[in-house]
Image (tube, coloured by chain):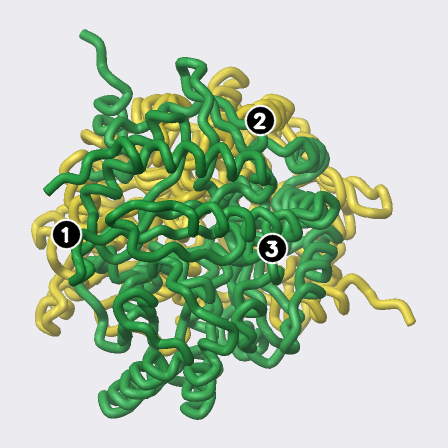
Chain colours: A green, B yellow
Amino acid sequence: MTETLAERRARLMGPNVPTFYRNPVHIVRGQGVWLWDAAGRRYLDCYNNVAHVGHCHPAVVGAIARQAAELNTHTRYHHDLVLDYIERLTARLGHGISQAIMVCTGSEANDIALRMAQAVTGKTGVIATDNTYHGNTAATSALSSRRPPIGGYPPHVRLVPAPDSLRNPDPDGSVLAGHVARAIAGLEAAGYGFSGMMLCPAFANEGIPSVVPGFFDRTAAVIRQAGGLVLCDEVQPGFGRMGSHFWGHEALGFAPDVVTVGKPMANGHPVAAILARPDVMAAFRNAFGYFNTFGGNPVSAAACLATLQVIEEEGLQDNAARVSAHGMDRLRALRHPLLAEVRGAGLFFGAEFVLDADQTPATDFVADLVEAMVARGFLLNRIGRAGNTLKIRPPMPFGIAEADLLMDALEAALASTPVRA
Amino acid sequence: MTETLAERRARLMGPNVPTFYRNPVHIVRGQGVWLWDAAGRRYLDCYNNVAHVGHCHPAVVGAIARQAAELNTHTRYHHDLVLDYIERLTARLGHGISQAIMVCTGSEANDIALRMAQAVTGKTGVIATDNTYHGNTAATSALSSRRPPIGGYPPHVRLVPAPDSLRNPDPDGSVLAGHVARAIAGLEAAGYGFSGMMLCPAFANEGIPSVVPGFFDRTAAVIRQAGGLVLCDEVQPGFGRMGSHFWGHEALGFAPDVVTVGKPMANGHPVAAILARPDVMAAFRNAFGYFNTFGGNPVSAAACLATLQVIEEEGLQDNAARVSAHGMDRLRALRHPLLAEVRGAGLFFGAEFVLDADQTPATDFVADLVEAMVARGFLLNRIGRAGNTLKIRPPMPFGIAEADLLMDALEAALASTPVRA
């Protein structure tokens, strides 16, 4: 009687545990942009943004190992490293944002950001797009349209139609601003008032729609006019991934009140943060005596510092810009009858496939395409409301050579993947 | 112009950031049960439960360093280590609890436990004691009486009077059971229904009241009678600290439906978990597609496995039992006019001080006593509704010799700390 790994997972983790791919890969080793499975097969990692500076980067591994051997305790004692890190990270932000709370996950960060907006405004109403994800706590899951919260959506949350550059072009963002203005009016009429809007400035979970600088300006003006805060979830776009800019909000050119960061900031070590102006921070800190046992511990701070240093020393933001331009050239050169739009920003790439002139999502085709790419040794995935957009989001050291390997394989997979009726 | 560390913290973290002690210590190094500050001064750690098997234990540090150099990625790929750990940990639990969700903090774990109870029962009402703490997310902070949630307490939460063995003796737990029965009736009358009660089985934040095995039986019966779940927060008592038992609920002798664990489980690496029966797990997993990016990654799993192995190989639970007995003997031998009650369970010790026969809390005196102990090189703290109970909760390798050092110092500090009017 032999139990498969999938059966063992179901026995120990329960049903409905998310995995990637029809036959989940069993990864045992990582180095840079490469992963190896238990059979020794190598995969090019075209998807993982957590291993931001590359899997098992020796500078980050070394920082963790050294600090773990020296001290790992909480911030109720004084320690320098967490302060060194906050100082270095906030130096990369404008708009008066100079303070931080260190936590352990992006979900914790966004859970706090929502309460910061409540503490500042005294209101509870909050807005997000209707095709997004900002975390898995009880509070943040209420904003995550693809995972309905247990107990249903609470009435103080309004989800507005997500940008969709293919189906509903909105070049200057006025359509989004109109939706947000109506949602604010609805929240005020219902008595909740409006505390703020949370968004990912790359709209990464929305399917990476094409948006240009200035796209969010009208919406930001509507939010401020109503006294709300702009809560900018930089968990995916932050730390240089946009190539042109260190932050997603810089690329779009708007001023956030609160910035949250997570996944990539320590290359996989569990750490995240909320960055805010002193007035916003004080409103939260004085309303609630927040403390996070693991947040900002010396090991986490050392891992964060090392990751930031690698981004700078290895010029990974510039690399993202270069590889982005080349990757977009290659994506634009793809030819396939179902390919409706290619788009991207920095080391985010999307390719949307549709079945017909009505833009019916080619969901099955993209699902098959992803599997075909895995079979060829390339890990990537799909995104968008119907899962019909190929999503490519590799670690930051992903170079021109790897982009060519990926695009060559994608051309071949496109040519050989049958279109199912 | 030189900025102090406290000023730098305020500049970078904002106001009202919790610290220990009037003059916070600046700790730079840890080893076993000892910590060193920046001036090279050594402190005996009589308080930190996160460094469960001792600060910077080489087995845990080594496991983290090795696995971080090999692979650190999420559980959407298959990996053995997280399954190995869940299997080993659930083997230590009875009551049909055999499955786990891995997360990063105790707050995340309790946030999920609350939703598990909602998913199982279809109700939202929840009960906790009125002098506790179960986390800092929006949902869990609603149970934390000492930190009122932003926006106030939601109406589906009922806080019942916490056990207080000094002021309100309740030897058989019938008083608590009566409070819980009335709270359930209130939740049902208000239309929320009753989903469950969350408790720490050591009542660690309540001031470690003296409770005997069977104390929770009547309350558990009331909870089950009403169809609710017993959500057992083992973040503090779990992993052998009780000495007599591996878990707090074992020591009290009741059957939980859900167990949450956190702080001590990987000796400071940010990890936590929710442990449940398959039926409870399925209700949650099927209602909500939960995924945690960092949760259960190979480095966290390796750190957890190493910590569990050290607890077993070094006999730390037995050590807790031995040192507990000796420490209680020494505590009972203390003589001081304000000392009202000493109590403890395993490597939890409490000593409550009052000013008079009305049991007016001697809060200032205990605050001064804590500072006097820090000045003598002993890190501990205070707890309880009025902060008038000395709390001692050392790392698990804390031995008889260290207990004697601590108790000798405590005798001297008691003799020399003035009683303020």
For the residues labelled 3 and 1, say whether their Cβ atoms are less than 8 Å apart.
no
Which residue is drawn at the image coordinates 76% and 66% (left, top)?
A: B8
Q: Name the amino acid, label 2.
A: Val
Q: Secondary structure at mark 2?
A: helix
In the foreground, A106 or B361:
A106
Q: Amino acid at mark 3?
A: Gly
Who's the residue at 50% across and 47% down the image? A327
Distance of label 3 from label 2 (alpha carbons): 33 Å
Q: Same chain for labels 1 and 2? Say yes or no.
A: yes
Of the pair A279 and B16, the residue shown nearer to us: A279
Q: Quadrant of the N terminus of chain B?
A: bottom right
**Residue A116 higher or lower than B212, as above or below:** below
Residue B405 in view in this figure: no
Q: Which residue is mark 2?
A: B60
Left or right: residue B339 versus residue A387 is right
Q: Is residue B401 left or right of residue A392?
A: right
Tell us which disc is closer to us: 3 or 2: 3
Residue A240: numbered disc:
3
Give the residue number, with chain letter if any, for mark 1.
B228
When the figure is inspected, residue B246 is found, relative to residue B102, above or below; the finding is: above
- The reply to whether residue A86 is in sight is yes
Chain bearing mark 1: B
> In the rendered image of this protein, does residue A204 appear above or below residue A392?
below
Residue B214 point in image, percent of width and height: 24, 40
Kind of element beneath mark 3: loop
Q: Mark on residue B129?
A: none
Chain letter of the residue beneath label 3 in the structure image? A
